[in-house]
């Protein structure tokens, strides 16, 4: 037996060379990529390099709000002028928010000779002189200007609490997996989040500390399956654990309902869950494809899901809402990882069979391609296996043979079969224009299906 071991080993190595037993990752040399773009989700940092000066809207802080017909909210001073020095009176914290710019990865805020970079649509900064010039620019990943006249939404002096940025009031139906998002509070080490259901605390979370101020969203890992009226709030916590701010206020944007049944539902991964432009979370509607469909579709997507994970949560998450039609967009996390296509198809077939057993009509949506060049550039996710296109093609071909399939593959593919660069900045997640393509395709299918059914 020992004599034949070298022969067996030699055969194995020979076959491995031809990539039969392993799916090698053809990974480029990452050392060639710019170091400053290694972590694109740094939320707020002082930009001392100032290497890309841009021209944008320049206004004094005291006049910026007036120019946009915005009221500056002044909080009452808690100490009298006689009790503090003049210099201390001049230094105030302002929270500035602006309208989200599609395809913007970050925003550059310049004031009093200091530059800040925010990966969300707001920031808190210290201003000594309210007559200082304020400059806000929307930038892409490479620091190129996307928009140089960013629309200001609000300017608030000495804000007492974090500002929530979820847009549940703009969603037709609330998602199953909530993502909480907010404008970070200066000096907050982490945050406490409370979710209320029918007026009582339903969940209570404390976020982890993120070392580069990347602390503006929180993905809830637990689904919201119980019917009721919900809202959530947040407050800042110091490094020592002391309460730093008041609780945020209840607003239409952080209030929503969970209702059953949901006639149309969508099962998927992060592409269904939402989010885009590298840093914008699913709580922003312009990056949710359901937003572009006239029919109300319950979002059952969960970021990071593989086909197997979707299969495993079928009874709990899908059956609970008793849909008539289930749109299934899955597979991208399989073929960008180490799951082979025949395993993906086996899982998808099992999901199809479960749908039919529960009287649900399954409608498959072909998964979008990847763009390895952008993935390498951004370094946001692992570089895909060498054969990802073959694996994806196998899944798409299987979906096209099913009774109902919405084929969006060609709309997202360039001449190399890669995900079009103009539709996804990170090479994986379609941005606003890409989400609109999916939403309109689903809407067209529903119009045809319901018209035929009638």
Image (cartoon, helix red, strand yellow):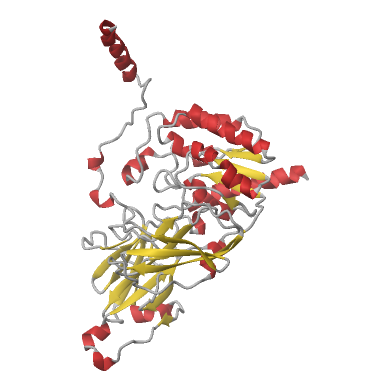
User: Residue 181 in the image: x percent, y percent?
Assistant: 43, 61
212 vs 339, left or right, is left
| Residue 332 in view of the camera | yes
| Quadrant position of residue 99 | bottom left
| Quadrant position of residue 171 | bottom right
User: Residue 104 in the image: x percent, y percent?
Assistant: 40, 57
Q: Is residue 211 above or below residue 99?
A: above
Q: Name the residue at 25% across, 37% down.
A: 29
Q: Name the residue at 28% across, 10% down.
A: 5
| Residue 442 in view of the camera | no
In the depicted view, which residue is nearer to us: 290 or 213?
A: 213
User: Residue 156 in the image: x percent, y percent?
Assistant: 39, 77
In the depicted view, which residue is nearer to us: 90 or 247?
A: 247
429 vs 39, left or right, is right
| Tally of numbered tags | 0
**Residue situated furthest right in the rendering:** 454
Q: Is residue 72 above or below residue 25?
A: below
| Quadrant position of residue 184 | bottom left
In the depicted view, which residue is nearer to us: 242 or 350?
A: 242
Which quarter of the rendering shows the N terminus?
Answer: top left
**Residue situated furthest bottom in the rendering:** 82
Which quarter of the rendering shows the C terminus?
Answer: top right
User: Residue 317 in the image: x percent, y percent?
Assistant: 57, 47
């Amino acid at each position: 037996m020992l004599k034949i071991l070298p022969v067996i080993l030699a055969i194995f190595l020979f076959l491995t060379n031809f990539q039969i037993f392993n799916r090698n990752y053809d990974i480029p040399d990452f050392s060639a990529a710019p170091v400053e773009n290694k972590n694109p989700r740094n939320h707020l940092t002082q930009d001392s390099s100032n290497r890309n000066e841009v021209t944008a809207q320049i206004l004094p802080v005291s006049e910026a709000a007036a120019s946009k017909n915005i009221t500056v909210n002044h909080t009452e001073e808690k100490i009298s002028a006689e009790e503090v020095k003049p210099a201390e009176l001049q230094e105030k914290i302002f929270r500035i928010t602006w309208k989200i710019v599609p395809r913007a990865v970050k925003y550059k805020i310049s004031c009093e000779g200091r530059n800040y970079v925010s990966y969300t649509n707001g920031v808190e900064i210290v201003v000594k002189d309210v007559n200082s010039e304020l400059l806000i620019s929307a930038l892409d990943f490479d620091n190129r200007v996307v928009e140089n006249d960013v629309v200001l939404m609000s300017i608030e002096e000495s804000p007492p609490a974090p500002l929530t940025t979820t847009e549940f009031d703009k969603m037709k139906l609330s998602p199953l997996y909530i993502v909480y998002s907010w404008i970070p509070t200066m000096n907050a080490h982490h945050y406490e989040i409370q979710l209320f259901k029918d007026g009582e605390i339903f969940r209570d979370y404390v976020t982890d500390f993120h070392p580069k101020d990347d602390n503006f969203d929180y993905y809830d890992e637990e689904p919201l399956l119980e019917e009721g009226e919900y809202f959530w709030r947040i407050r800042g916590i110091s490094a020592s654990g002391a309460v730093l701010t008041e609780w945020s206020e209840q607003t239409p944007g952080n209030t929503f309902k969970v209702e059953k049944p949901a006639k149309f539902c969508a099962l998927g991964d992060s592409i269904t869950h939402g989010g885009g432009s590298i840093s914008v979370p699913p709580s922003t509607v312009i990056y949710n494809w359901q937003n572009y469909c006239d029919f109300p579709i319950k979002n059952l997507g969960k970021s990071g899901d593989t086909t197997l994970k979707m299969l495993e949560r079928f009874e709990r998450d899908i059956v609970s809402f008793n849909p008539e039609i289930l749109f299934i967009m899955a597979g991208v996390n399989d073929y960008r990882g180490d799951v082979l296509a025949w395993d993906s198809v086996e899982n998808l077939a099992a999901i199809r069979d479960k749908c039919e057993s529960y009287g649900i009509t399954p409608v498959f949506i072909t998964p979008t391609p990847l763009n390895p060049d952008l993935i390498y550039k951004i370094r946001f996710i692992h570089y895909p296996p060498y054969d990802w296109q073959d694996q994806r093609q196998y899944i798409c071909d299987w979906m096209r043979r099913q009774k109902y399939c919405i084929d969006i593959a060609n709309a997202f593919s360039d001449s190399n079969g890669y995900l079009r660069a103009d539709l996804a900045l990170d090479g994986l997640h379609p941005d606003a224009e890409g989400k609109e393509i999916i939403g309109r395709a689903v809407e067209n299918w529903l119009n045809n299906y319901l018209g035929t059914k009638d």
